[in-house]
Image (cartoon, rainbow, N blue to C red):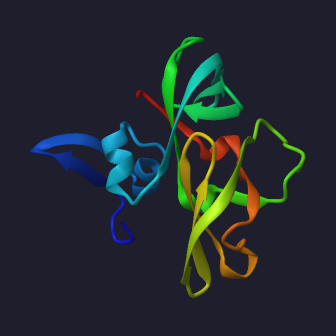
Amino acid sequence: MALSDRVVVMDRGKALQVGAPEAVYRQPASRDVAAFFGTPNLIETRVTACRPANDGYVLSVEGGECRAGRPFAPGDAVLLMVRPEDVTLANNGVTLTNGQLAWTGKVVDGVFRGSRRSLSVETPTMRFTVDCPATRAANIGDTVSLLVDAANAWALRP
């Protein structure tokens, strides 16, 4: 992606999405496109409200807000795509701001990757993958809060 100003994600000879690399990575058109670039966290939730925004829509969902490229109706099921590098670890009881999404879970695994550490965090509803600075990572067994800014959560059709 570093050498291109436009990418095409294809499956079985069909173009799934065409666009600038960062747009395709951050705002995938489908679950298949999201999964083409790594292992995103995919969270099932429901829309409670939808409003237009500058470059699309802002959805209120169970637990916070996210962005979307198309409108959704209250009650619609959505799949939130959150990249592992967009999840921030915080202490329990942290105050949420600006529609942030939050989950509480327990660190169940970790892999040291030099300056980064990849963690697996088990919440009551799913297992998250979190990429964080190695010096700020939690230890296996720690209970942590996972925070995601609304701008870093993208809604997809399930």
Question: Who is closer to the viewer here, 102 or 144?
Answer: 144
Q: Residue at x 69, y 52 (%)?
A: 105
Q: Is residue 55 visible?
A: no
Vertically, is 116 above or below 66?
below
Residue 94: image location, x then y, percent: 88, 50
Q: Quadrant of the C terminus?
A: top left
Residue 4: image location, x then y, percent: 33, 65
**Side (left or right) of 155 relative to 32:** right
The residue most toward the bottom is 114
Question: Who is closer to the viewer here, 105 or 86?
Answer: 105
Residue 73: image location, x then y, percent: 55, 11
Q: Residue at x 80, y 59 (%)?
A: 90
Vertically, is 116 above or below 114?
above
Q: Is residue 149 visible?
A: yes
Q: Residue at x 85, y 42 (%)?
A: 97
Q: Quadrant of the N terminus?
A: bottom left
The residue most toward the top is 74
Residue 48: image location, x then y, percent: 66, 17
